[in-house]
Amino acid sequence: MKILIYGAGVLGSYAAYELNRAGHEVTILARGKRYEELMEKELVIRHWLQRKTTVDKINVVKELLPEDYYDATFIVMQNSQVEAVLSTISANVGCPLFVFVGNEDKAKEVSYKIKNAAKGNPRILFGFFSIGGRRQEGKVISVHTKHPDFDIGDLEGEDDYKPIIEKIFKATSFKVKYHVNMEDFLKSHIAFIMPLAYLAYMSNCDLRKIAWNKSILNSAIDAIIEGLEVLVKLGYKIDPESSMKLVKNHRRAAYFGLKICAATSIGRLAISDHCKSAYSEMKHLDKALFELIKKSNLQAPNINKLREYLIKYEHKRNIQE
């Protein structure tokens, strides 16, 4: 199948690697320096946990034209960048399926804008790759398990898209997880990751500094609970449901899991590095979480306390710039 990966960061690069190895005709859309890197050095990925490096030749383009055809297009970019590409996607008449992959806090708005402006009649889905890492000197350092999760769903509870997704991912190492309402998953994910992002900014993107601070780690767990309770109050379903049970009923396990993550390189590669390189995205999600709290009329003292460190980190960045 012809697959376009719209975005060549850590997630997009790894997705391209997997789909190319599965036998699909994969093309990456990249621009600027990243385009030049892929043309010159090809797709270089350091699989951190697996302790191996792969180099693959991948088709690379700079743009998506209105008449271009791909069986599926995966838009893998930071949420703050999505708005800028909606007009390009809406103008395309050849692609039947677009999947927005990442921390998308306004999935309904994105879907609505495309459906109302699209020249064709594309299927719009939302997804999330459970992969971390960073880009470094022309290559991607990817942190992923043997079978990383790929969560996917639409916003209406329909499952007509499953056959093509099964066909695309059948020969990959991804473990596909389908969701009835991807909006619930994406909102739940924000409630989970933002307290961790706050910890990263508190430690100046070096989580090892706070790995042994019991009070701070517990405050982050309390902040996660606050965020999830905000979502419940607003009528969202926590997805996965087990996440609420973990932080509430198995707090000790959640605490030690967070501590181990913060104390090891996993925390740096999966959390700190992303928070450092994608500050604009984290700031965007912080605003989204703050708006949800305000709408719920619930108190969130732990979130409010921790998010001050994001604000301080921004102030420090501004001074340095």
Image (cartoon, rainbow, N blue to C red):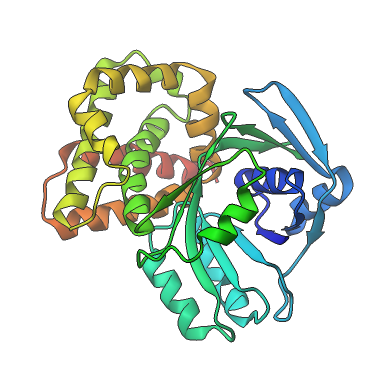
Q: Position of residue 111 (x, y in %)?
A: 44, 72
> Where, quadrant-wise, is the N terminus in this rendering?
bottom right
Image vertical order of residue 215 relative to residue 177, above or below = above
Q: Is residue 121 left or right of residue 19?
A: left
Residue found at the far right of this picture: 40
Q: Position of residue 40 (x, y in %)?
A: 88, 47
- The residue positioned 17% from the left and 50% from the top of the image is 232
Residue found at the far top of this picture: 212
Image vertical order of residue 268 relative to residue 102, above or below = above
Q: Position of residue 113 (x, y in %)?
A: 45, 78
- The residue positioned 44% from the left and 23% from the top of the image is 207
Q: Position of residue 19 (x, y in %)?
A: 70, 48
- The residue positioned 16% from the left and 39% from the top of the image is 301
Figure disc tally? 0
Q: In front: 310, or 55?
A: 55
Image vertical order of residue 152 relative to residue 41, above or below = below
Q: In front: 111, or 20?
A: 20
Q: Is residue 243 left or right of residue 153?
A: left
